[in-house]
Amino acid sequence: MNKTLYKTNIKANWGIFAFIFGMLMIYVSTSIAMFNPENADAMKAMFDMMPEGMIKAFGFTGLGTELTGYLAGYLYGFILIVFPLIYTALIANKMIAGHVDNGSMAYLLATPNTRKRVAGTQAIFLASTSALLIVIITGIIILMSAAVFPGHLEIPSFLLLNLVTLLLLVAVGGIGFLASCIFSDKKYSLAVGAGIPVLFVLFKMLADISEKVEFFRYFSIYSLLDAHRILEDVPYALIVGGSLLALSIVLYIAGIVIFNRKSLAI
């Protein structure tokens, strides 16, 4: 890994990270503030008043009357899928294709760095900052929950849920990174790197709306993030987590190999 390049990436991309983090903080703090353990049934009834199709599409189902299940239903069906997706799509596009497209890759490769080292550094930056986003949000949720509703959050199962979420985000980032390594034009890289995960989100939403189109879940990686099942079924969570980790490794390595072998007009 090239530490200088990694630090340069931090300076160039901290704004995007801060924006996505800020948006997540708004939803996280609001969701915890909305929870009322003494009147959870009334809160559930409030959500039930919303259109059923919208409730299902955005994953606001099975909120439950206890904090862990409530957060799993409110945050992990849509919010902690879409906003991190925006981060990985934007950053992945900049990692390789962005440098090739604007000509700065020529300067990077003119230094004593091989293509593998440059691509490897970019892959590590994308994966590590994506993971950091989930780690920080997880820590904040735990701290806020402990301060407002001490003892209500089942921390071990909640940590497992967030580990799977983290691995899912890293895998989605791997799709964007692979696209960034394949395409030299950043608009094509973004179209594929962001387009495929967005399709996955749409497929998941369609599958959740009606049983008639439930088969769409088999075409979406996000269907693996079954928050309530992860909380209740540790073996399932471990299998999903292991599969996502393996997929991430394949995607990032494939991207590095492709970039190392591709012809660059620089």
Image (cartoon, rainbow, N blue to C red):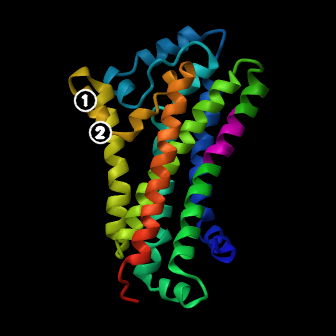
| Residue 93 x/y as whole percent | 44, 66
* Residue found 45% across the figure and 48% down from its top: 247
Disc 2 target residue = 219
Q: What secondary structure predominates along the stretch shown in magenta? A: helix
Q: Which percent across, then down, holds residue 218?
A: 30, 34
Q: Amino acid at mark 2?
A: Phe
Secondary structure state at the residue bearing disc 1: helix
Quadrant of res 162? top right
Q: Residue at x 42, y 28 (%)?
A: 59
Q: Is residue 191 visible?
A: yes
Compute the Cα span from label 1 to label 2: 8 Å
Magenta-drawn segment = 133-141
Farthest residue toward the left? 212
Q: Nearer the viewer, residue 70 or 243?
A: 243
Of the pair 70 and 97, the residue shown nearer to us: 97
Q: Measuring from the top left, give residue 157's x and y in whole percent.
A: 63, 25
Which residue in the structure is indicated by mark 1? 215
Q: Is residue 116 found inside the magenta-colored segment of the image?
A: no
Image quarter where the C terminus lies is bottom left
Amino acid type assigned to the residue bearing label 1 in the image: Phe
Mark 2, Cα crowd under 10 Å, few <14 / some 14-19 / many 20+, is: some
Measuring 63% from the left and 20% from the top, which residue is drawn there?
67
Label 1–label 2 contact, CB within 8 A: yes
